[in-house]
């Protein structure tokens, strides 16, 4: 709708986070640009959850919001065969597939097929595949207290006709809501009354293609931490009668894991403070984002409450927080390719599928884009499994389980977390991306070199013998038990206190090996070390995934009339009828379908 808003960060100026950072690295491994653009515009980088195991480590970057837009513009405008048109879509063009030659030849039943779009400027675009990624714009309605404003986000109009042109063909539509906090003028903040939160000093990054030395400049902007207090809470409670969340003005469902400040007060009435993060929006602006204070309360209530926090006593703001309601489509009506089951040729991705977050949207967009292109050339779609990528977990959850609130990715949603680490996304996905035509030859060769170097370190650790006298002095300083005999380096690296980095000073041969590794030595040594330390856990998860894959190979769609299967629970029958899963594995992940229901289906298949 506005080329100057391409890649606009609608909410917080950050990329990544718990499980979200893994998705960004997966996008990068597949050939997407999100990681590279983030690295080019990062003003602070942190690896979250470092105190936990590597399956939980999650990269997160604060970005310069303005530079992020223009970095993306540069990528898009220099992408061969990509054409940009600034306009707003009014209607999806859908035709009866009974007139299509492939349908007649295959004797298939008629199915609505998307063939193009019409725009408000009177343009018509036709295509074999169409991808809708409308975010919060479909019938978007913003709420600030009792004030209601049509809009897709602040100062931008909504899309008012497109959702209806899709829904009339049988795609189920519902409403969701999300919110965003106040934006603060840094000149009115007393930063001395807040706790500074610096970023990591190492040259960490998202993209496997970015060199560490190239991403460290300009990353020294800190965030700040402060807290609400009881006086703040009293002012907010007094404003609840005017909150659209609690006066009946908003009826739609909101995100459980990113609640508004008023929801926190109602849900946790015994808490006398809530943590807030003040995050910079860029290097050349005074605008700051107040993470943790999402609100739809009236403007005066937001400002008066915030001024009761010592650091904000002279507060000036650029704009208030607000809630926004919007239409989304039931994701259980999608194939795993993200093509609609109802309208042939229509692919849906992002918040229109009931998700929330830039990263979840980007992962879906990449898969929808790949599969829309493959549909045009009659190729099989790319389906990522739950043991291959968080993107696969995300899409499988949407298609098999649906949503009853905005879906946000967490590490706890993945049953194969030790396989889906942020450090090994290229090992999982780059060769797949290359086969799909989205990961370049350069990226593939870059990964293959890294793979060879990781394997060299692992081979060295498996075969190199460590003598007692070489390391016992070091062990004493590290607080780990001394050796009573020599052993292989791999055995030593199983100890939690020992790493390749702290062992290398005592082992010249290890130092010599590391000196031959590429410019990404720390990244490569870290992945090799994780593979060594967690070898047993990794093997166990691989075995579990292989067992589940056997169920993925058992196709059940069209083989049962579930309404006649009285040996299956009533809830199980209802859910199987509604979702119509493709495979037995998908059926097993539908809430309400019990293990005994799956066993019944296995027995019937055996017959």
Image: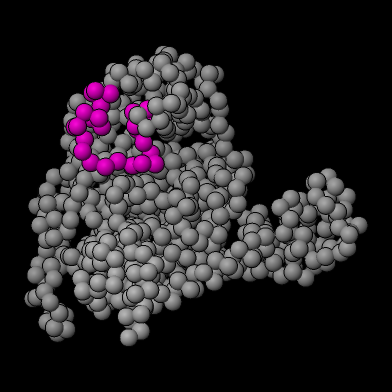
Quadrant in which the N terminus is drawn: top left
- Relative depth, front residue between 113 and 67: 113
- Residue at 84% in and 49% down: 474
107 in magenta: no
**Magenta-highlighted residues:** 240-265
Quadrant in which the C terminus is drawn: bottom left
256 in magenta: yes
Q: Give the quadrant of residue 511.
A: bottom right
- Residue at 28% in and 29% down: 296
- Residue at 9% in and 75% down: 98
User: What percent of the width, then of the height, locates residue 492?
Assistant: 77, 59
User: What percent of the width, then of the height, locates residue 427?
Assistant: 54, 66
Question: Quick check: 198 above or below 600?
Answer: above
Question: Quick check: 499 above or below 604?
Answer: above
- Residue at 11% in and 61% down: 169
- Relative depth, front residue between 561 and 54: 561
Residue 88 visible from this viewpoint: yes
Q: Main secondary structure of the magenta part?
A: loop
Residue 531 visible from this viewpoint: no
Q: Farthest residue to the top: give it.
A: 314
Q: Farthest residue to the right: give it.
A: 469
Q: Farthest residue to the front: give it.
A: 567
């Amino acid at each position: 709708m506005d080329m100057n808003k391409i890649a606009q960060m609608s909410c917080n100026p950050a990329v990544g986070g718990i499980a979200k950072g893994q998705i960004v690295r997966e996008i990068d491994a597949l050939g997407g640009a999100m990681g590279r653009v983030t690295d080019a515009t990062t003003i602070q980088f942190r690896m979250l959850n470092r105190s936990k195991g590597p399956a939980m480590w999650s990269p997160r970057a604060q970005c310069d919001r303005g530079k992020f837009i223009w970095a993306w513009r540069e990528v898009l405008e220099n992408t061969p065969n990509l054409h940009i048109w600034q306009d707003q879509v009014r209607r999806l063009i859908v035709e009866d597939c009974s007139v299509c030659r492939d349908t007649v030849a295959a004797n298939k039943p008629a199915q609505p097929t998307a063939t193009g779009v019409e725009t408000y400027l009177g343009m018509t675009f036709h295509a074999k595949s169409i991808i809708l990624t409308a975010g919060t714009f479909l019938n978007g309605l913003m709420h600030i207290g009792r004030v209601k404003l049509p809009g897709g986000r602040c100062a931008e109009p909504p899309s008012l006709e497109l959702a209806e042109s899709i829904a009339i063909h049988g795609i189920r539509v519902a409403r969701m809501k999300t919110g965003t906090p106040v934006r603060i003028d840094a000149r009115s903040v007393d930063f001395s009354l807040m706790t500074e939160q610096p970023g990591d000093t190492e040259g960490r990054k998202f993209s496997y293609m970015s060199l560490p030395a190239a991403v460290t400049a300009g990353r020294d902007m800190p965030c700040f931490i402060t807290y609400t207090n009881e006086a703040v809470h009293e002012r907010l409670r007094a404003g609840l009668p005017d909150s659209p969340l609690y006066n009946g003005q908003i009826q739609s469902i909101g995100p459980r894991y990113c609640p508004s400040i008023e929801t926190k007060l109602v849900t946790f009435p015994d808490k006398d403070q809530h943590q807030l993060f003040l995050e910079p929006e860029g290097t050349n602006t005074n605008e700051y984002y107040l993470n943790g204070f999402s609100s739809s309360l009236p403007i005066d209530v937001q400002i008066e409450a915030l001024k009761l926090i010592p650091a904000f006593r002279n507060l000036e703001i650029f704009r208030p927080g607000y809630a926004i309601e919007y239409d989304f489509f039931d994701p259980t009506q999608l194939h795993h390719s993200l093509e609609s089951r109802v309208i042939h040729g229509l692919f849906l991705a992002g918040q229109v599928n009931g998700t929330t977050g830039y990263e979840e949207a980007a992962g879906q967009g990449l898969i929808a884009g790949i599969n829309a292109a493959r549909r045009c050339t009659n190729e099989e779609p790319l389906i990522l499994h739950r043991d291959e990528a968080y993107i696969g977990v995300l899409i499988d959850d949407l298609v098999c389980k649906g949503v009853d609130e905005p879906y946000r990715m967490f590490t706890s949603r993945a049953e194969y977390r030790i396989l889906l680490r942020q450090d090994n996304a290229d090992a999982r996905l780059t060769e797949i991306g290359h086969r799909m035509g989205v990961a370049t030859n350069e990226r593939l060769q870059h990964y293959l070199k890294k793979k060879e170097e990781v394997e060299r370190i692992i081979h060295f650790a498996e075969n190199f013998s460590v003598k007692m006298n070489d390391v016992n002095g070091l062990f004493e300083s590290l607080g780990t038990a001394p050796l009573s005999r020599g052993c292989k380096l791999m055995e030593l690296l199983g100890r939690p206190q020992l790493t390749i980095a702290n062992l290398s000073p005592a082992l010249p041969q290890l130092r010599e090996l590391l000196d031959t590794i590429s410019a990404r030595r720390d990244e490569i040594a870290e992945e090799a070390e994780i593979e060594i330390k967690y070898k047993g856990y990794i093997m166990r998860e691989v075995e579990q995934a292989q067992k589940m894959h056997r169920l993925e190979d058992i196709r059940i769609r069209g083989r049962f009339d579930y309404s006649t299967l009285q040996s299956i629970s009533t809830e199980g029958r209802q859910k199987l009828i509604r979702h119509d899963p493709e495979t037995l594995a998908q059926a097993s992940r539908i809430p309400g379908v019990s293990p005994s229901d799956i066993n019944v289906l296995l027995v019937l298949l055996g017959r």
